[in-house]
Image (tube, helix red, strand yellow):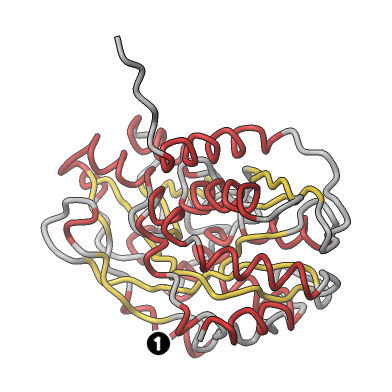
Amino acid sequence: MKTRRLPAVVVALAAAVSLVACGGQQEPPASGSASGGRLTIATGNTTGVYYQLGGAYASVISEKMSGYRATASETGASVQNVQGLVGGNYDIAFSLGDTAADAVNGVNSFQSKQDVVALTRLYNNFTQVAVRTSANINSIADLKGKRVSTGSPNSGTEVIARRLLEAAGLDPAKDVTAQRLGLPESVDAMKSGSIDALVWSGGLPTGGITDLTTSLGKGVKLLSITDLLPKMTEKYGSVYSEAPIPAATYKQPADVSTIVVPNVLLVRKDMKDELAEQLTKTLYENLDALVAVNAAAKGIDKANAAKTDPVPLHPGAQKALDALK
Protein backbone atom coordinates (compact mmCIF):
# COMPACT_ATOMS: atom_id res chain seq x y z
CA MET A 1 0.00 0.00 0.00
CA LYS A 2 1.29 3.45 -0.96
CA THR A 3 2.07 5.79 1.94
CA ARG A 4 0.41 9.18 1.61
CA ARG A 5 2.41 12.28 2.45
CA LEU A 6 0.57 14.74 4.61
CA PRO A 7 0.07 18.22 3.11
CA ALA A 8 2.50 20.82 4.44
CA VAL A 9 -0.26 22.84 6.11
CA VAL A 10 -1.40 19.77 8.12
CA VAL A 11 2.15 19.18 9.31
CA ALA A 12 2.45 22.83 10.29
CA LEU A 13 -0.81 22.79 12.22
CA ALA A 14 0.18 19.59 14.03
CA ALA A 15 3.40 21.29 15.03
CA ALA A 16 1.43 24.26 16.31
CA VAL A 17 -0.71 22.04 18.51
CA SER A 18 2.38 20.30 19.84
CA LEU A 19 4.05 23.58 20.66
CA VAL A 20 1.00 24.88 22.48
CA ALA A 21 0.54 21.66 24.41
CA CYS A 22 3.98 21.98 25.95
CA GLY A 23 3.41 25.60 26.92
CA GLY A 24 2.32 24.78 30.46
CA GLN A 25 5.85 23.68 31.43
CA GLN A 26 7.89 26.61 30.30
CA GLU A 27 11.47 27.51 31.08
CA PRO A 28 12.61 31.11 31.50
CA PRO A 29 12.60 32.75 28.04
CA ALA A 30 15.71 33.82 26.17
CA SER A 31 16.92 37.40 26.32
CA GLY A 32 15.13 38.27 23.10
CA SER A 33 18.22 39.00 21.06
CA ALA A 34 18.01 39.45 17.31
CA SER A 35 20.44 36.60 16.60
CA GLY A 36 18.32 33.63 17.64
CA GLY A 37 17.05 31.88 20.76
CA ARG A 38 13.83 30.70 22.35
CA LEU A 39 10.69 32.82 22.43
CA THR A 40 7.60 32.23 24.55
CA ILE A 41 4.14 33.51 23.59
CA ALA A 42 1.42 34.14 26.22
CA THR A 43 -1.99 33.17 24.81
CA GLY A 44 -5.21 32.30 26.70
CA ASN A 45 -7.70 29.52 27.51
CA THR A 46 -7.40 26.26 25.59
CA THR A 47 -10.72 26.64 23.73
CA GLY A 48 -10.15 30.32 22.92
CA VAL A 49 -8.79 31.99 19.79
CA TYR A 50 -5.59 33.32 21.43
CA TYR A 51 -4.54 29.75 22.17
CA GLN A 52 -5.10 28.57 18.61
CA LEU A 53 -3.49 31.55 16.91
CA GLY A 54 -0.61 31.63 19.39
CA GLY A 55 0.22 28.02 18.55
CA ALA A 56 0.13 28.74 14.83
CA TYR A 57 2.30 31.85 15.24
CA ALA A 58 4.81 29.88 17.31
CA SER A 59 4.99 27.26 14.56
CA VAL A 60 5.55 29.94 11.90
CA ILE A 61 8.31 31.64 13.92
CA SER A 62 10.08 28.33 14.47
CA GLU A 63 9.85 27.45 10.79
CA LYS A 64 10.54 30.82 9.17
CA MET A 65 12.89 32.68 11.54
CA SER A 66 16.31 31.05 11.42
CA GLY A 67 17.77 30.26 14.84
CA TYR A 68 14.52 30.73 16.75
CA ARG A 69 12.25 28.22 18.47
CA ALA A 70 8.93 29.53 19.73
CA THR A 71 6.45 27.96 22.13
CA ALA A 72 2.95 29.12 23.07
CA SER A 73 1.69 28.95 26.65
CA GLU A 74 -1.87 28.55 27.92
CA THR A 75 -2.70 31.42 30.30
CA GLY A 76 -5.59 33.24 31.91
CA ALA A 77 -5.20 35.81 29.07
CA SER A 78 -4.83 39.60 28.94
CA VAL A 79 -4.05 40.90 32.44
CA GLN A 80 -2.00 37.83 33.34
CA ASN A 81 -0.25 38.04 29.95
CA VAL A 82 0.84 41.64 30.51
CA GLN A 83 2.01 40.85 34.04
CA GLY A 84 3.99 37.84 32.80
CA LEU A 85 5.44 39.81 29.89
CA VAL A 86 6.71 42.60 32.15
CA GLY A 87 7.92 40.02 34.67
CA GLY A 88 10.06 38.30 32.03
CA ASN A 89 8.05 35.05 31.85
CA TYR A 90 7.03 35.68 28.24
CA ASP A 91 8.52 37.46 25.22
CA ILE A 92 5.30 38.09 23.28
CA ALA A 93 1.75 38.42 24.59
CA PHE A 94 -1.76 38.60 23.19
CA SER A 95 -3.94 41.20 24.91
CA LEU A 96 -7.24 42.97 24.60
CA GLY A 97 -6.86 46.63 23.69
CA ASP A 98 -8.63 47.89 26.81
CA THR A 99 -6.35 45.89 29.11
CA ALA A 100 -3.28 47.05 27.17
CA ALA A 101 -4.46 50.66 27.49
CA ASP A 102 -4.84 50.20 31.26
CA ALA A 103 -1.32 48.75 31.37
CA VAL A 104 0.43 51.66 29.63
CA ASN A 105 -1.58 54.16 31.68
CA GLY A 106 -1.02 52.33 34.98
CA VAL A 107 -4.71 52.19 35.96
CA ASN A 108 -7.34 49.68 37.10
CA SER A 109 -5.57 46.27 37.18
CA PHE A 110 -2.12 47.93 37.10
CA GLN A 111 -0.68 50.01 39.92
CA SER A 112 1.98 51.61 37.72
CA LYS A 113 2.67 52.21 34.03
CA GLN A 114 3.87 49.03 32.35
CA ASP A 115 6.79 49.06 29.89
CA VAL A 116 4.98 47.35 27.04
CA VAL A 117 4.64 48.27 23.37
CA ALA A 118 2.78 46.78 20.43
CA LEU A 119 3.97 44.84 17.41
CA THR A 120 0.60 45.25 15.72
CA ARG A 121 -3.11 45.55 16.13
CA LEU A 122 -4.82 42.22 15.49
CA TYR A 123 -8.47 41.23 14.92
CA ASN A 124 -11.43 42.42 17.00
CA ASN A 125 -12.68 40.54 20.04
CA PHE A 126 -16.43 40.14 20.26
CA THR A 127 -18.09 40.22 23.68
CA GLN A 128 -20.17 37.07 23.75
CA VAL A 129 -22.73 36.78 26.54
CA ALA A 130 -24.37 33.37 26.49
CA VAL A 131 -27.35 32.61 28.75
CA ARG A 132 -29.47 29.56 29.42
CA THR A 133 -32.85 30.15 27.76
CA SER A 134 -34.66 28.84 30.85
CA ALA A 135 -33.03 31.48 33.08
CA ASN A 136 -35.25 34.32 31.75
CA ILE A 137 -32.32 36.64 31.02
CA ASN A 138 -32.80 39.21 28.25
CA SER A 139 -30.29 41.89 29.24
CA ILE A 140 -27.19 42.40 31.36
CA ALA A 141 -29.42 43.97 34.04
CA ASP A 142 -31.33 40.67 34.21
CA LEU A 143 -28.15 38.98 35.48
CA LYS A 144 -28.93 40.32 38.96
CA GLY A 145 -29.15 37.40 41.34
CA LYS A 146 -27.90 34.95 38.72
CA ARG A 147 -24.88 32.63 38.63
CA VAL A 148 -22.48 34.11 36.08
CA SER A 149 -19.04 33.12 34.87
CA THR A 150 -17.09 36.37 34.48
CA GLY A 151 -13.99 34.72 33.00
CA SER A 152 -10.61 33.57 34.25
CA PRO A 153 -9.00 35.60 37.05
CA ASN A 154 -6.86 38.41 35.59
CA SER A 155 -8.25 37.95 32.08
CA GLY A 156 -9.47 40.54 29.61
CA THR A 157 -12.85 38.80 29.75
CA GLU A 158 -13.07 39.47 33.48
CA VAL A 159 -12.25 43.14 32.89
CA ILE A 160 -15.02 43.64 30.35
CA ALA A 161 -17.51 41.48 32.29
CA ARG A 162 -17.12 43.70 35.34
CA ARG A 163 -17.44 46.83 33.24
CA LEU A 164 -20.63 45.55 31.60
CA LEU A 165 -22.21 44.75 34.96
CA GLU A 166 -21.32 48.18 36.31
CA ALA A 167 -22.67 49.88 33.18
CA ALA A 168 -25.96 48.04 33.78
CA GLY A 169 -26.07 49.40 37.33
CA LEU A 170 -24.99 46.16 39.02
CA ASP A 171 -22.30 45.59 41.61
CA PRO A 172 -20.14 42.67 40.34
CA ALA A 173 -19.26 41.72 43.92
CA LYS A 174 -22.81 41.73 45.31
CA ASP A 175 -25.48 41.57 42.62
CA VAL A 176 -24.38 38.38 40.87
CA THR A 177 -22.94 35.10 42.05
CA ALA A 178 -19.71 35.43 40.09
CA GLN A 179 -17.77 32.34 39.05
CA ARG A 180 -14.24 33.18 37.84
CA LEU A 181 -13.95 30.33 35.36
CA GLY A 182 -11.93 29.78 32.23
CA LEU A 183 -13.88 29.19 29.04
CA PRO A 184 -13.73 25.35 29.07
CA GLU A 185 -14.98 25.29 32.66
CA SER A 186 -17.64 27.92 31.88
CA VAL A 187 -18.97 25.86 28.98
CA ASP A 188 -19.09 22.72 31.13
CA ALA A 189 -20.91 24.64 33.89
CA MET A 190 -23.47 25.96 31.40
CA LYS A 191 -24.07 22.44 30.08
CA SER A 192 -24.58 21.05 33.59
CA GLY A 193 -26.82 23.93 34.63
CA SER A 194 -24.57 25.03 37.50
CA ILE A 195 -24.38 28.56 36.07
CA ASP A 196 -26.98 30.65 34.25
CA ALA A 197 -24.72 32.74 32.03
CA LEU A 198 -21.18 33.29 30.86
CA VAL A 199 -19.28 36.25 29.49
CA TRP A 200 -16.55 35.66 26.92
CA SER A 201 -14.42 38.07 24.92
CA GLY A 202 -12.93 36.39 21.87
CA GLY A 203 -12.70 36.17 18.11
CA LEU A 204 -15.26 34.59 15.83
CA PRO A 205 -15.76 31.73 15.94
CA THR A 206 -14.59 30.68 19.39
CA GLY A 207 -14.44 26.90 19.72
CA GLY A 208 -15.88 26.80 23.22
CA ILE A 209 -18.93 28.87 22.24
CA THR A 210 -19.43 26.69 19.15
CA ASP A 211 -19.40 23.65 21.44
CA LEU A 212 -21.92 25.26 23.79
CA THR A 213 -24.41 26.38 21.14
CA THR A 214 -24.13 23.05 19.33
CA SER A 215 -24.63 21.01 22.51
CA LEU A 216 -27.49 23.01 24.02
CA GLY A 217 -29.16 24.17 20.82
CA LYS A 218 -32.21 26.29 21.66
CA GLY A 219 -31.37 25.88 25.34
CA VAL A 220 -28.84 28.72 25.05
CA LYS A 221 -28.90 32.14 23.40
CA LEU A 222 -26.59 35.12 22.92
CA LEU A 223 -27.55 38.52 24.32
CA SER A 224 -27.49 41.83 22.50
CA ILE A 225 -25.60 44.24 24.78
CA THR A 226 -25.08 47.38 22.68
CA ASP A 227 -27.53 49.37 24.85
CA LEU A 228 -24.58 49.65 27.27
CA LEU A 229 -22.11 50.97 24.69
CA PRO A 230 -22.73 54.70 25.39
CA LYS A 231 -21.89 54.25 29.07
CA MET A 232 -18.85 52.14 28.22
CA THR A 233 -17.44 54.69 25.77
CA GLU A 234 -18.24 57.59 28.07
CA LYS A 235 -16.14 56.04 30.83
CA TYR A 236 -13.43 54.19 28.89
CA GLY A 237 -13.20 55.93 25.52
CA SER A 238 -13.31 54.81 21.92
CA VAL A 239 -11.55 51.48 22.55
CA TYR A 240 -15.08 49.98 22.50
CA SER A 241 -17.33 49.91 19.43
CA GLU A 242 -20.31 48.01 18.02
CA ALA A 243 -20.47 45.07 15.59
CA PRO A 244 -22.76 42.11 14.91
CA ILE A 245 -22.12 38.46 15.63
CA PRO A 246 -23.44 37.00 12.35
CA ALA A 247 -26.20 34.44 12.83
CA ALA A 248 -24.25 31.84 10.86
CA THR A 249 -21.29 31.96 13.29
CA TYR A 250 -23.08 29.88 15.91
CA LYS A 251 -26.22 28.95 13.94
CA GLN A 252 -28.37 31.47 15.82
CA PRO A 253 -31.78 32.68 14.57
CA ALA A 254 -30.49 36.20 13.82
CA ASP A 255 -27.43 38.45 14.08
CA VAL A 256 -26.64 39.62 17.62
CA SER A 257 -25.35 43.17 18.19
CA THR A 258 -22.46 43.31 20.59
CA ILE A 259 -19.51 45.34 21.85
CA VAL A 260 -16.12 44.76 20.29
CA VAL A 261 -12.60 45.70 21.31
CA PRO A 262 -9.40 45.26 19.26
CA ASN A 263 -6.64 42.85 20.20
CA VAL A 264 -2.97 43.78 20.18
CA LEU A 265 0.25 41.78 20.16
CA LEU A 266 2.59 43.08 22.87
CA VAL A 267 6.30 42.92 23.66
CA ARG A 268 8.53 44.70 26.16
CA LYS A 269 10.03 48.07 25.26
CA ASP A 270 13.56 46.67 25.46
CA MET A 271 13.10 44.13 22.66
CA LYS A 272 15.74 44.65 19.97
CA ASP A 273 14.46 46.60 16.96
CA GLU A 274 15.63 43.92 14.53
CA LEU A 275 13.79 41.15 16.38
CA ALA A 276 10.56 43.18 16.60
CA GLU A 277 10.85 43.87 12.87
CA GLN A 278 11.36 40.17 12.08
CA LEU A 279 8.43 39.09 14.25
CA THR A 280 6.07 41.59 12.66
CA LYS A 281 7.18 40.79 9.14
CA THR A 282 6.89 37.05 9.76
CA LEU A 283 3.35 37.44 11.08
CA TYR A 284 2.10 39.30 8.01
CA GLU A 285 3.95 37.14 5.51
CA ASN A 286 2.37 34.00 6.97
CA LEU A 287 -1.18 35.08 7.85
CA ASP A 288 -2.59 32.14 5.92
CA ALA A 289 -1.17 29.78 8.54
CA LEU A 290 -3.11 31.61 11.26
CA VAL A 291 -6.32 31.77 9.22
CA ALA A 292 -6.01 28.00 8.70
CA VAL A 293 -6.46 27.39 12.44
CA ASN A 294 -9.12 30.04 13.11
CA ALA A 295 -11.04 32.37 10.79
CA ALA A 296 -10.73 35.22 13.31
CA ALA A 297 -7.26 35.84 11.85
CA LYS A 298 -8.95 37.12 8.68
CA GLY A 299 -9.52 40.30 10.69
CA ILE A 300 -5.77 40.99 10.94
CA ASP A 301 -5.37 43.78 8.41
CA LYS A 302 -2.23 45.69 7.37
CA ALA A 303 -4.36 48.80 6.91
CA ASN A 304 -5.17 48.85 10.66
CA ALA A 305 -1.92 47.34 11.94
CA ALA A 306 -0.45 50.57 13.33
CA LYS A 307 -3.69 51.66 15.06
CA THR A 308 -2.63 50.61 18.55
CA ASP A 309 -3.21 53.87 20.47
CA PRO A 310 -2.77 54.49 23.33
CA VAL A 311 -0.24 51.65 23.26
CA PRO A 312 2.96 52.81 21.49
CA LEU A 313 4.11 50.85 18.45
CA HIS A 314 7.59 49.32 18.72
CA PRO A 315 10.02 51.11 16.35
CA GLY A 316 11.04 47.80 14.79
CA ALA A 317 7.41 46.90 14.17
CA GLN A 318 6.84 50.32 12.62
CA LYS A 319 9.72 49.68 10.22
CA ALA A 320 8.24 46.32 9.20
CA LEU A 321 4.77 47.78 8.68
CA ASP A 322 6.14 50.68 6.63
CA ALA A 323 7.87 48.16 4.35
CA LEU A 324 4.65 46.19 3.92
CA LYS A 325 2.65 49.16 2.61
Badge 1: how crowded within 10 Å, few (<14), some, or many (20+)?
some
Q: Depth check: give the residue in front, 131 or 74.
A: 74
Question: Residue 298 location, x and y as percent?
Answer: 37, 65
Q: Quadrant of the N terminus?
A: top left
- The percent position of residue 41, horizontal first and vertical second, equals 67, 52
Number of marks present in the image shown: 1
Corner quadrant of residue 88: bottom right
Q: Nearer the viewer, residue 203 or 259?
A: 203
Q: Three-letter amino acid code at disc 1?
A: Pro
Q: Secondary structure at mark 1?
A: helix
Tell whether 117 sits left or right of 249.
right
Residue at 76% across / 73% down in the picture? 116
Instruction: Decide: is 101 above or below 71.
Output: below
Answer left or right for 304 relative to 141. right
Q: Nearer the viewer, residue 49 or 77?
A: 49
* Residue 204 coordinates in the image, percent (x, y): 35, 58
Q: Residue furthest top?
A: 1
Answer with left or right where residue 96 lies relative to residue 243.
right
Residues 4 and 159: in front is 4
Q: Is residue 70 above or below residue 310?
A: above
- Position of 155 with respect to 135 (left or right) is right
Point out the residue furthest to the front here. 2
Report the residue marked by disc 1.
230
Q: Which residue is drawn at the image coordinates 74% and 50% (left, top)?
A: 68
Q: Residue at x 21, y 44 (%)?
A: 134
12 shown above or below 258: above
